[in-house]
Each structure stands twice: as C-alpha cells, then as structure tokens.
Amino acid sequence: MKQTEEKSVAYERVMDAAERLFARRGYNAVTLRDIAAEIGIHHTTVYHHVPGGKEQLYIDVVERNLAHHRHGLTGAIVGAPSNIRSQLRAVADWLISQPPMDLVRLVYSDLPSIDPVQAERLSRIAFETMLLPIEAILLSAREQGVIEYEDLILAAGTFLGMIESLYAVPQRVAMKSRQAMAYEMVDILLNGLRPREDTHT
C-alpha cells in the first residue's frame, strides 16, 4: 500500500511538471527529458511512471485539468445567485483564478499531434466541461425571457474566448484588474456596445 502511495505521489509530481511545461510551450515543444529536468530526475524514470510515453502523459494531464475545471466551474455556478450576470461573473472569477487553458492551441496544435481517437475524446470532454456549463446559464436566462439569442453555443464560446484573452494582457500595463475587465466583458456580452437608453433621458 505504501509503495503504491509513493508511486502515486511521484506520478503527481511528474504530471505537475508536465502540466507547467505543456502550458508554457505546447505539446510539440516539450520532451520527456524536459519534464524530468523540471523536477530533477533522470528521463528514464519518467518512463517508469508513464509507460505510454509523452502522449499518455499529455492525455493524463489534460484529463486531470479538465476534471479540475469541471469541479470548479460547477461549484462556482451553484454558489452564485441564480441570475445570468452573477453566474457569468462566477464563471469568469473561476477561470481567471486558474492558469490559462489556451483552448485555441489545444484544438489547433496539441490535439492534432496525438492519436486521433484520443484527440476526439479529449475535444469532447473539453466541450462538455468548458462550454456546456456556460450554455446552460444562457439557456436558463433565455427560458426566463432575459435574453433572446438563438446560438447559445456560439455565445458561450465567445464569452469563454473573451475571458481567456485576458491572459494576453500583461498585468503591469493593464489599467484594471483582470476581474474588473472580466466583469466588463460580461456587461458587453449582455448589454452590447450601444449606449443605454437612460443616458438619453
């Protein structure tokens, strides 16, 4: 039992290192030697923990990351007041509290480099994890007559992309916090860019 626990802890260290490097460089630019060097072990030791090599390690890292997001997003939405603005703000708060997912690179660079069956499976999990909870918020708001837009998956993807784009804004030059910018993006999504009617009264 103790040996199994030690192996599990060691593998978690390997996955943590791999996640950091994959996030910074992408799947193709990272080797098992890089991952081993990140935690100060010999690269052959990594194979001991991951017989499937770099691809299996990448799959495990993405699955773990998505499971983490699924749990976090669900908790954030459940814990927020049941109105669209509060729930979208809760989603934004969760996303900006985490390292960026970089879904564009995931879809267009990383996943095409692994087994197509696994890539399709991870793509489906990412869709279910990152987009469906946002779509559910929008669907509930539409059923209540708060919004009218039809293509809610497009709207959910737009919102997710807007929040992810905040990572490209260096904090040293940003005039506002990421949270403040995220909340403004929620307002833009819900109100559009047109002036409010009360500004003309």
Image (cartoon, rainbow, N blue to C red):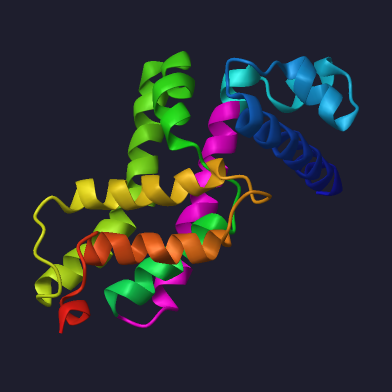
Residue 73 lies in magenta, yes or no? yes
Asked if residue 55 is positioned above or below residue 38 in the image, the reply reads above
Magenta stretch secondary structure, dominant = helix
Q: Position of residue 31 (x, y in %)?
A: 70, 15
- Could you tell whether 115 is left or right of 194 in the image? right
The answer to whether residue 73 shows anywhere in this view is no
- Could you tell whether 35 is left or right of 151 in the image? right
Q: Where's the C terminus, which quadrant?
A: bottom left
Residue at x 79%, y 47% (from the top left corner): 5
Asked if residue 115 is positioned above or below residue 57 in the image, the reply reads above
Span highlighted in magenta in the image:
58-82
Q: Position of residue 146 (x, y in %)?
A: 15, 74
Numbered marks: total: 0
Residue 67 lies in magenta, yes or no? yes
Looking at this rendering, what residue extends furthest in the front direction?
200
Q: Position of residue 172 (x, y in %)?
A: 68, 50
Residue 45 found in image quarter: top right
Residue at x 59%, y 59% (from the top left corner): 97
Residue at x 8%, y 55% (from the top left corner): 150
- Could you tell whether 92 is left or right of 171 in the image? left
Asked if residue 105 is positioned above or below residue 197 in the image, the reply reads above
Query: Along the line of sight, which residue is nearer the eye, 7 or 104?
Result: 104
Q: Position of residue 76 (x, y in %)?
A: 46, 70
- Could you tell whether 193 is left or right of 126 in the image? left
Residue at x 49%, y 37% (from the top left corner): 102
Query: Along the line of sight, which residue is nearer the eye, 56 or 198?
Result: 198
The answer to whether residue 22 shows anywhere in this view is yes
